[in-house]
Amino acid sequence: METLTRLRDHGTADRISNEREQPMYLRITEAAQLMGLSKSKTAEMASLGDLPGVVRFGRAVRVHRGMLLAYLERLARGDAA
């Protein structure tokens, strides 16, 4: 209980809670918004295999949020994609 209180005091508990509320998989439109690209360009990247973490659930295409964020961080650092 004391640890949880300390985490709450530093905002860590809220951050962990917020991360749990985020969906693990994003729709193409959500991934596009995150990257600042059009839906069609993002869908094209997904179909060509240029976007990491793409999975298909039947006809639905989703992008793994964590993998996409890691990819964007690598691009921001200038690392090879």
Image (cartoon, rainbow, N blue to C red):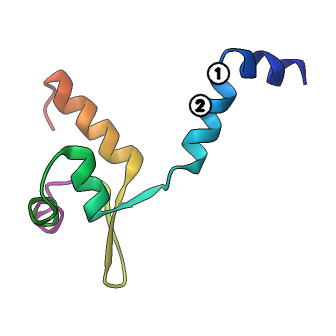
Between 4 and 51, the one nearer to me in the picture: 4
Whole-percent x, y for residue 70 in the image: 32, 37
Kind of residue indicated by mark 1? Gly
Q: What's the mark number on residue 50?
A: none
Q: Is residue 61 left or right of residue 65?
A: left
The C terminus appears in which quarter of the rendering? top left
Whole-percent x, y for residue 37 in the image: 13, 51
* Residue drawn at point x = 21 percent, y = 45 percent: 35
The quadrant in which residue 4 appears is top right
For disc 1, the neighbor class at 10 Å (few under 14, some 14 to 19, many from 20) is few
Let me know if residue 52 is in the magenta part. no
Tag 1 and tag 2, C-beta contact below 8 Å: yes
* Residue drawn at point x = 42 percent, y = 59 percent: 25
Q: What's the mark number on residue 15?
A: 2
Name the residue carrying label 1.
11
The quadrant in which residue 53 appears is bottom left
- In this figure, what is the number of numbered marks? 2
Whole-percent x, y for residue 76 in the image: 19, 27
- Measure how far apart labels 1 and 2 are at the Cα level: 6 Å
**Magenta region:** 45-51
Query: Is label 1 in a helix, a strand or a loop?
Result: loop
Kind of residue indicated by mark 2? Arg
Please say if 8 is above or below 16: above
* Residue drawn at point x = 27 percent, y = 30 percent: 73
